[in-house]
Image: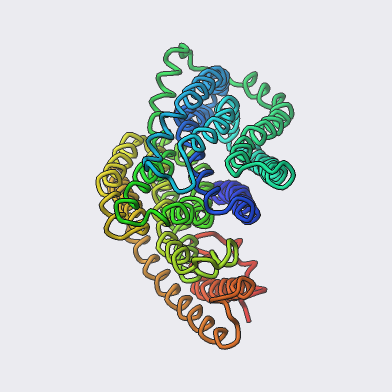
Amino acid sequence: MSNIVRGTMLLTGASFLSKFLGMIYVIPFNALVGETGGTLFAYAYTPYSIFISISTVGVPLAVSKFVSKYNAVGDYETGMRMFKAGISLMAVTGFLAFLTMFFSADWLAGRMITSDDPVNITVNDVAFVIRMVSVALIVIPAMSIVRGFFQGHNSMGPTAVSQVVEQIIRIVFLLGGAFVILKFMNGTITAAVGFSTFAAFIGAMASCLVLFVYWKKRKTYLNRQIEQQTYTHEIPKKDLFIEIFRYAGPFVLVGLAIPLYQMVDQFTFERAMVAADQKDIWEFAYSAINFYGHKLVIIPITLATGLSLAILPTLTNSYTQQNRQLLNKQINQALQIILVLVIPAVVGMSMLANEAYGSLYGMGKIETTGTLLAWYAPVALLFALFSVSSSILQGINQQKYAVFSLLAGLLIKVLFNIQLIYIFGAKGAIFGTALAAGTAVVMNLWRIRSAIDFSFKEIIKRTILIGIFILFMCIAILLTKYIFGFFLPFEEQRWAALVMLIIGVGIGGMVYLWFAYKSTLLERVLGEKVRFLDRFLSK
C-alpha cells in the first residue's frame, strides 16, 4: 500500500507543481493577450491534445502496464523489447500526426469559427496557432514512451522531474516570446499566441534531455536485471504489438476525455451563443471556462492524474497474482484518496470562485466569470473520479468498458450541448460536460462492482463523513466572508480579493483538516504518515 501512496505523492507533487506553474503563468499571459488571446490559445491546444493522444495511441501508459506485468514474473527482457519497438512506432506516428494537424489546420479552423462577421478571432488566426503548436507532435510521443517504461518499473522520478522541467522551460519561452513580440516588435496578439504555442516543442526537447540523463544512469541496472533473469517469453514482435494495442486502445480514449469535451465546445459554443443572441460575450465566456477557469479547475485533478499513473502497475500486479483481498484494499484506498482530498478542494473553489478568478485575472465582468468558475469547479470531481475509475478498470482487464463509458458520455455531450448553451447561456457548456462526465463515472463504478464483486459500503460511509466535515468548512468560509466583508472590499478590489482568497482557503482548509484528522479519517485513508499534523492540530 505504501508504494501506491509514495508513487501517488511523487507524481501528484510533480503534476501539482506543473499545473500550479501552468496556472501562475496565465496571470501575466492574461495581462499580455487578454480574453481573446486566451480563447485563441485554447482553440489551438485542444486539438493538439487530441492529436497527442491519437499519435501515442495510448502506448505510453500501456507500456507501463505491459512492463509491470512481465516484471512481476521476472521477465525483464520482454519489457525492454517492447520499449524499443514502441520508441520506433511513436517516432513514426508522431511525425504523421504532425503532418495531419499541420495540413488540416484550415479545415479545423473553418468549422470552429462559423460567423460571417467574427468579432475578434478569424479562421486564419485559429489556423495559424494550430500550425505553430503542431510541431511539438514530432517529439512528444517518443518522449512519453520513456516515461511509461520507467513507470512500469515503479520508478516515478523520471516522469516527475521531466514534467516539471518541461513546464518551466515552456513557460519561460512562452511568456518571453509573447512579451517580445507585443512590447518590442509591436506584433499582433495572433503572432504572440502562435509563438506561445510553439513553446510546447521547446519544453518537450528539455524533457527529452532530462529523460536521457536518467536513462544513462539506469541503463547498467536495467541490463543487469535482464542478464540475471532465468526465463523469458519468446513472443514474436507481431504478438507484442497485438498485446500492447489491446491494452493501448482504451488508454487513448480515456486520456482524451477532457479534450474531447472541450472540442465539442469548440465546434458548438460560438454558434450556440450567436443563436442565443450572446455573440458579443462568447469569446470571454469561452476563455473563462475552457482556458482561464480550466487552469484553476485542473489543480484538484492533478491528484487523480498522479494516482492513476501510480496505481496502475500495482493493481496490475495484484490482479495478475489473483490477490483479490489486496486488490480490493487498493481500489478502496484509491477512490477514498480522491474523495477525501478532491471534494473539499472543489467545494472550497466553488465558494471562493469570485475571489479566485478576480484575484488572478482581474475583477472585470467578475459577475459572469466568477459564476462560471463556481459552476465549473465541482465538475473537477467527476473528471478525477473518471480518471481513477478508468485506471482501475484497466488494471483489472476491463479496459474496453472504460471506452464504452467515455463514448456514452461524449454522445450525451454532443446531443445536448447546443441546446443547453441556448437555454442556459455559457453555463450550458458546463452542464453538458457535467452530465457527460457523470454518466461515464457511474458506468465505470458499476462495472468495477460487477467485475470483481467490489463493495462500496466503506466508501459510501466515508463520503457521508466527508460531507459532514465539508458542511462545517462551508459554514466557516461563509462566516469569514461575512465578517471580513465589513472592512475588506473583496467584491470590488483585486488586492482585497486575493487577501480574502488566502484567508478563506486558510480557514476553510484548517476547519476541514481538523475534523478529518481528529476523526482519524485522514490516517485511515492516507496512512500513519499524516501524524506529522499533530504539531499543528493537536492543540
In the foreground, 393 or 538: 393
Tell me if residue 394 can be seen: yes
Q: Position of residue 17 (x, y in %)?
A: 63, 51
Above or below residue 142? Residue 163 is below
Q: Which residue is painted at 48% across and 52% down in the image? A: 287
Q: Position of residue 195 (x, y in %)?
A: 63, 37
Q: Position of residue 163 (x, y in %)?
A: 63, 41
Q: Position of residue 392 (x, y in %)?
A: 40, 43
Q: How is the image coloured?
A: rainbow
Q: Is residue 231 visible?
A: no
Q: Is 498 located above or below residue 300 in the figure?
A: below
Numbered marks: total: 0
Q: Residue at x 57, y 84 (%)?
A: 484
Say left or right for 167 vs 38.
Answer: right
Q: Is residue 230 left or right of residue 271?
A: right
Quarter assignment of residue 424: bottom left
Q: Looking at the figure, which quarter contains the C terminus?
A: bottom right
Look at 37% across and 43% down and name the residue there.
Answer: 115
The quadrant holding residue 132 is top right
Q: Nearer the viewer, residue 420 or 16?
A: 420
- Left-right relation of 152 to 347: right
In this view, the residue in front, 261 or 280, is: 280
Looking at the image, residue 17 lies above or below residue 114: below
User: Extreme front residue here?
Assistant: 117
Between residues 318 and 498, which one lies in front from this camera angle?
Answer: 498
Residue at 31%, 42% (x, y): give it.
Answer: 410
